[in-house]
Image (spheres, rainbow, N blue to C red):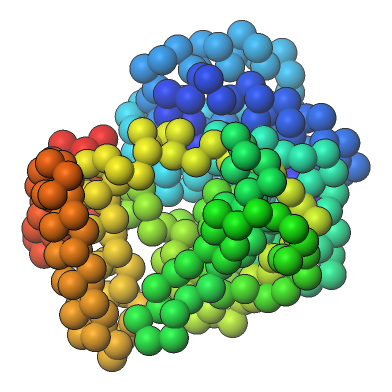
Amino acid sequence: MKLAVILVNYNGKLYNEACIESIRGNGFAGELRIIVADNASSDDSVRILKERYGADDSVTVIALDDNYGFSYANNAGIRRAQEWDADYVMLLNNDTELAPDMLRELTACADRHPGSVIAPKICYSDDRRRIWSAGGEMSPVIRKVRHIGLNEEDEGQYDREREIAFAPGCCLLLPMSVIREAGVLDERFFLYYEDTEYSFRLQEKGIRMYYCPTALMYHKVGASTRGADSPLCAYYIARNWLLCSRLHLSGRYPLFVIYYALNRAACSLLWLLRGKTELVRATRMGIRDYRKGRFGRSGQYR
């Protein structure tokens, strides 16, 4: 088996080495390549990566000339993996670390479910007994995604391998056959909701997703986006949630819009009460840009 692990980096010099070393130290039995797609970082990431891994043929650094976003960089990595003729690609956030044997467990799960997408158990890096995601599910009407087990102590309650409706983009194991059928990530999203859109697309293609509880990893949540409570986050969620739902909800979209308006109004009221007017402004800009068909990278929120 030939596995390409794709990391997207943007000013992540504090995280890259720990992530890469956890991959290299996993004892994967097949052929392994690590592809780092850098979105024009300004923190010396590329220089540090090349100094540390430049002599290692198993690590490739793609230095993009601008910050094109999460989807674009992953797609650049996928193209390089296709050139290498990989059997699988694993999309992995660089602010993560893999537990020992994670790759073996994840690929064994893939063998049990050929042609399917596999997601691991993800716990917080700073509280390794607390779950961030044990797979994902969607609500029945507006198809809002939810991480199963979010913030729960891991007491084995999610230790059953099962089919899921949503696979978080923090870590996805994709057979190349799935990419050929479903395509690559949608580059209009730039940041956030690209994994939700991809899960919708997989469902529509009849491609199954499975959660593998024995494959464990740890996530430094929010490290690459300065935390969830930021204007950058508010802008892209406001815009991309609308785009994703318009693409896939069909007749349910009007019901979603009602829920969305109430949800964003409630969030904006809470932000105003906390004096975070910049989040309200970012949300309004996200909605405005959605209406004007402005996607990809925002001129203000980079």
Is 150 on the left-hand or right-hand side of 85? Answer: left
* Residue at the image position 75 percent from the left and 58 percent from the top: 155
Is residue 139 among what the camera can see? Answer: yes
Residue sticking out furthest to the top: 51
Is 228 on the left-hand or right-hand side of 33? Answer: left
> Residue 28 at what x, y percent from top left?
85, 40
* Residue at the image position 68 percent from the left and 76 percent from the top: 163
> Residue 102 at what x, y percent from top left?
79, 46
Residue sticking out furthest to the bottom: 251
Is 243 on the left-hand or right-hand side of 187? Answer: left
Residue sticking out furthest to the right: 29
> Residue 202 at what x, y percent from top left?
54, 73
Depth check: give the residue in front, 147 or 7.
147
Depth check: give the residue in front, 19 or 81.
19
Q: Quadrant of the C terminus?
A: top left
Is residue 293 among what the camera can see? Answer: no
Dividing the picture into quarters, in which one does residue 84 lie? top right
Q: Total label count?
A: 0
| Residue 133 sits above or below residue 69 on the image | below
* Residue at the image position 60 percent from the left and 57 percent from the top: 152
* Residue at the image position 72 percent from the left and 74 percent from the top: 162
Depth check: give the residue in front, 225 or 46.
225
| Residue 168 sits above or below residue 14 on the image | below
> Residue 56 at what x, y percent from top left?
74, 19
Dividing the picture into quarters, in which one does residue 227 lie? top left
Is 40 on the left-hand or right-hand side of 159? Answer: left
